[in-house]
Amino acid sequence: TKNITFLLITLAIKYKLLSTLFKWNFVMRSTYPGFYSTTDEALRDIWNSRSTLFVFDANCLLNLYRCEEHTRKEILNVMEELSSRTWIPFQVGYEYQKNRRKVIQDSINSLTTIQSELQKSYTHNVLSQGSIKKHLNTALSQEVTDLQKEIEKIVEKYLSSKIQPRVDSKNEVSRHDFIRDEIDKIINDNIGSLPDQQKINEINAEGEKRYSNEIPPGFKDNKSEINHFSGIELTGKFGDLYLWKEIIEKASAPDITSVVFVCDDTKTDWWYIQNGKTHGPLEALKTEICKESSVENFSLINQSTFLLHAKKYLGNVTVSESSVQEVKVLSNIASSEKITEENSDVEITLGKRAYSEFDKYIKDSLSLHRTVSKKPLDYYFNSCKQAISDFTSVELRARKIHSKVKSLNEDEDDYETETLEKIFELRDELVEYMIQAKHLVNRLERVMLDYSANELIDSDLLQRQISRLERWNGRVISICRKIATLLR
């Protein structure tokens, strides 16, 4: 009897302790949801739950025009499998429709550029480039001519079998967009409604306050464009905030308990990045959506992770490793293009580095023949992304300071001559540092693309480049602070 009593008391104590721990854990999670990640077990349930909403950003849809046919088919198959649980915000649909034609044409232009570059291998006058007189080197001239004829056969065979079919496919999409037909069928009427101007104006006003305090998402956007659609004026820099507000509103429906947002925007106003490693959405984002809607789980993943999770958690879809790798490369390219597009005026000011220079830098300086282990590659690759993201933020702040300094030319009476001289001297120094940093950013972006394609790189040298960029960033920040002090 004593043993049974002791056992019952022990069980009661354990039950009380477990209940208390569970209660504490529940309270902690419900109070700080943004700091908790989702386990693999929970992810499996989320992916197979009827109450999970899958949301895609515009770049994920546009990548369907950039990728190879087999990759596109696999992505669409997964999206088709999830179609009843898929929804896109109005803002995503608008950005997709607005940029669709440009992406198609860019794809065609890339292929025709490849075609013309390959043809140069047998049309280029090699002898004249080497300052060789043809009449003095008849035998050599004939040998080169014969060689180029052989190269021509190989190149033209490749172009006709590999490049031209791709060009024809892209042209077919341009004539009749069957990719959009597939997207329309998957999305159907699962799309956010057109907001009214009053709602847009309210978000714009809130966005100004949020961005000034770096509250995500979108505070790193620098779009100055204004778009008009169906009588509504949309401010470009608040595009991310528009779609985020739509997601929160949609997630407030009682039948939705989880949201998976597939987003290829790599800026740090969406992702939490620590020591070069991406850990998921920023705490503020996850906390906001969990507090303001009915969802219990919010996942932010890129498109390559989306395919990996589909392969892992959905039993009746096929996803190849080549598709995952291709989407990974496309995500990096799209992110790079987005940064360039949003800062086009900066590119004009600081100057673009020609891609031929990038290629030469890669070949001559980065020793791509050396292979390093997978772990350092991931670390350096993520460090590279973080360094570029940090520079973008620094550059935007520096441009604001620089713009304010330029306005002093029209209002010099407000400052003493000595102060003005210091400001303009610092301005010149600031521009020089920004130019140096921009060169490094361009190099690192190119390295990222090459890494994604073949995973061969000298990681030590890459780390030195990242460190250099961090130093340039530090100098830009230092000069900005000095100028800001003088402008007060």
Image: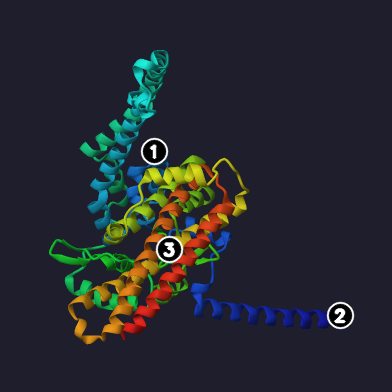
Residue ID at (32%, 24%): 123
Which residue does the numbered mark 1 point to in the structure image? 68
Horizontal arrangement in the rendering, residue 10 relative to residue 60 (left or right): right
Q: Whole-Å distance between the Cαs marked 2 and 3?
A: 65 Å
Element under label 1?
A: loop
Q: Residues within 10 Å of mark 1 (few under 14, many from 20)?
A: some
Using the image, determine if residue 40 lies above or below residue 480.
Answer: above
Element under label 2?
A: helix
Q: Which label lies toward us, 2 or 3? A: 3
Query: In the image, residue 239 lies at what x, y percent?
Result: 28, 65
Q: Which mark is residue 473?
A: none
Residue type marked 2: Asn
Query: In the image, residue 71 lies at what x, y percent?
Result: 42, 40
Element under label 3?
A: helix
Residue ID at (42%, 77%): 291
Q: Whole-Å distance between the Cαs marked 2 and 1?
A: 71 Å
Residue type marked 1: Glu
Residue ID at (39%, 59%): 438
Query: In the image, residue 133 lies at what x, y percent?
Result: 35, 21
On-image quarter of the N terminus? bottom right
Q: Residues within 10 Å of mark 2 (few under 14, many from 20)?
A: few
Q: How many marks can you see?
A: 3
Pick out the residue farthest to the right: 2
Which residue does the numbered mark 2 point to in the structure image? 3
Which residue does the numbered mark 3 point to in the structure image? 389
- Which residue is nearer to you in this view: 30 or 159? 159
Query: In the image, residue 370 lies at what x, y percent?
Result: 59, 43
Q: Which label lies toward us, 3 or 1? A: 3
Q: Earlier in the sequence, mark 2 or mark 1?
A: 2
Q: Earlier in the sequence, mark 2 or mark 3?
A: 2
- Which residue is nearer to you in this view: 364 or 61? 364
Pick out the residue farthest to the left: 231
